[in-house]
């Protein structure tokens, strides 16, 4: 069997712990993949990845994709019909006029911009979360950082990759919405807020026109440039890959998650649960009030989206599973990682629906929704708690959704946002039925997981690349997804049970009450 690579598309996404590449055929089916594991590092109090991390990881990931194509089909990738790149949103990559990186990459995970976040929210009357790019810029201004005198351009990780491969300083509107507020009517940065920011900059002694520092905003389907000869060599140092491949607008992981779950239409939503966790709900109308716990972003084609984002989700869960794996190895038990997750997760479903007096906070980093600037993973229990393995694992599964639950309650209960379907994807859902069941009870709403959910954001950006080159005249992104990508898709839906939803609510009462202990640990356990 051979592939017609001229009809295939490649999507590559930079996640927090893994870079993943997916090759899809003309039917949007994944036919090969590659990956590269990486990890952010804490340097001088800043969560970062180096440029060597970025390019070495990308090249290794792409080469692994090429190796699989060679092994499965006996072909080398010389060209494809389209490509796309996506990455974790937000953060701060700042460059001078000669494209020199001015300060180490400040990722979304940093919670060092609280002053800027609060001041910009007040100036704009619009929520500016700490991880947003504009908050990082304004915090640097408040601190009078030396690098600002040379600042010529700043962008996200996806925008940086795309620029180096095409020479185009552009960004998909969904990713751009995590840099600076977007006007969903004009499909560009909000002009009024741009003016307010420039005025605030002048008051602080900076002669910025922030619009000129930001990448150009593009929507799904817009022309975004082609792979240059230099870009091809950067991606594939072997020289096999040819220049000239069209690239779609670079997007953030939120937008690709929406695409991968077919959640870009009004009243649909998706939850991405991995190292971090976020829920995206496509709105019928603007929210009534300003809520610091809720972000306003967009779909890849520019519809307004309310986003609840929490920095911490599965990291602590994975660490505990790793501990059990170490124990199994010490006693000579042979069990695969997937089987170990399955045993522990499924056993959690047999525990008490309120976790029997056990409490966990899987905070590896700070958490804005709950007021933590730093995190300390913490487990505690009442003296009379039912301390079983099932309750132990269930408490960690529940805790992984705790901060998200607080934000979603505001969206659903206070803002009365309509939601017809909620789709889950990401690592939490890999063990069939367990994360889906816990999520349904936590949100008190049915949760669906498609068979393709495990493909994730790399598949989503590959679809966006295919949409750019294959769409019919006037064909919208929702129509393309419904008619050409998900027409015959299969999946499962799990509805909440009243008693388990009530149990989760009881757990959340303890979760909120115990946050003072987590805050004390973060403050005192250095």
Image: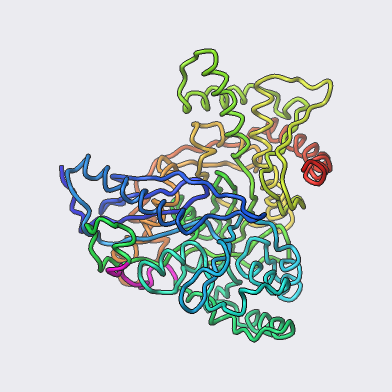
Q: Position of residue 388 (x, y in %)?
A: 70, 19
In the image, which residues are magenta?
Answer: 219-230
Disc tally is: 0
Horizontally, residue 418 falls left or right of residue 429, namely right
Residue 222 is one of the magenta-drawn residues: yes
Q: Is residue 145 above or below residue 63?
A: below
Residue at position x 19%, y 43% in the image: 73
Q: Position of residue 383 (x, y in %)?
A: 84, 22
Q: Position of residue 331 (x, y in %)?
A: 54, 13
Residue 158 is one of the magenta-drawn residues: no
Residue at position x 71%, y 45% in the image: 375
Most common SS among magenta residues: loop
Horizontally, residue 154 falls left or right of residue 136, namely left
In this orientation, which residue lies closer to the viewer: 241 or 279? Answer: 241
In this orientation, which residue lies closer to the viewer: 321 or 498? Answer: 321
Horizontally, residue 244 falls left or right of residue 351, namely left
Residue at position x 38%, y 68% in the image: 221
Q: Position of residue 52 (x, y in %)?
A: 45, 56
Residue at position x 57%, y 34% in the image: 318
Q: Is residue 491 above or below residue 349?
A: below
């Amino acid at each position: 069997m051979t592939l017609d690579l001229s009809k295939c598309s490649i999507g590559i996404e930079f996640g927090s712990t893994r870079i993943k590449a997916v090759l899809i055929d003309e039917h949007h089916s994944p036919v090969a993949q590659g990956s590269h594991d990486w990890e952010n590092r804490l340097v001088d109090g800043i969560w970062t990845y180096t440029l060597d991390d970025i390019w070495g990881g990308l090249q290794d990931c792409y080469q692994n994709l090429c190796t699989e194509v060679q092994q499965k089909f006996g072909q080398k990738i010389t060209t494809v019909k389209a490509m796309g790149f996506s990455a974790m949103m937000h953060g701060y990559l700042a460059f001078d006029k000669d494209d020199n990186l001015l300060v180490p990459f400040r990722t979304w995970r940093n919670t060092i911009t609280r002053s800027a976040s609060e001041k910009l929210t007040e100036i704009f009357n619009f929520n500016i979360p700490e991880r947003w790019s504009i908050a990082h810029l304004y915090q640097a201004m408040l601190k009078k950082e030396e690098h600002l005198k040379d600042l010529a351009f700043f962008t996200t990780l996806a925008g940086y990759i795309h620029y180096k491969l095409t020479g185009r300083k552009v960004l998909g509107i969904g990713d751009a919405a995590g840099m600076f507020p977007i006007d969903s009517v004009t499909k560009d940065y909000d002009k009024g807020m741009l003016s307010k920011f420039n005025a605030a900059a002048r008051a602080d002694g900076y002669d910025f026109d922030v619009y000129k520092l930001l990448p150009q905003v593009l929507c799904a389907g817009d022309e975004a440039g082609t792979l240059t000869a230099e870009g091809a060599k950067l991606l594939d140092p072997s020289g096999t890959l040819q220049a000239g491949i069209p690239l779609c607008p670079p997007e953030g992981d939120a937008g690709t998650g929406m695409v991968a779950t077919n959640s870009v239409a009004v009243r649909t939503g998706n939850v991405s649960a991995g190292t971090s966790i976020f829920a995206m709900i496509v709105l019928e109308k603007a929210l009534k009030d300003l809520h610091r716990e809720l972000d306003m972003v967009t779909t890849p084609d520019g519809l307004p989206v309310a986003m609840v984002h929490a920095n911490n989700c599965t990291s602590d869960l994975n660490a505990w599973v790793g501990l059990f794996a170490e124990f199994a190895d010490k006693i000579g038990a042979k069990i695969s990682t997937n089987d170990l997750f399955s045993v522990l997760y499924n056993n959690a479903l047999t525990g008490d629906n309120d976790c029997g007096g056990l409490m966990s906070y899987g905070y590896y980093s700070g958490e804005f929704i709950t007021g933590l600037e730093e995190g300390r993973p913490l487990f505690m229990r009442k003296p009379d708690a039912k301390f079983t393995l099932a309750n132990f694992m269930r408490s960690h599964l529940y805790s992984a959704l705790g901060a998200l639950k607080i934000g979603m309650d505001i969206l659903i209960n206070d803002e009365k946002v309509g939601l017809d379907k909620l789709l889950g994807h990401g690592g939490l859902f890999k063990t069939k039925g367990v994360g889906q069941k816990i999520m349904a009870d936590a949100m008190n709403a049915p949760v669906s997981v498609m068979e393709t959910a495990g493909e994730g954001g790399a598949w989503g950006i590959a679809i966006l690349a295919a949409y750019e080159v294959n769409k019919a005249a006037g064909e919208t992104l929702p129509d393309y997804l419904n008619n050409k990508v998900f027409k015959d898709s299969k999946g499962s839906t799990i509805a909440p049970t009243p008693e388990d939803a009530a149990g989760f609510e009881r757990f959340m009462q303890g979760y909120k009450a115990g946050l003072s202990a987590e805050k004390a640990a973060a403050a005192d356990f250095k």
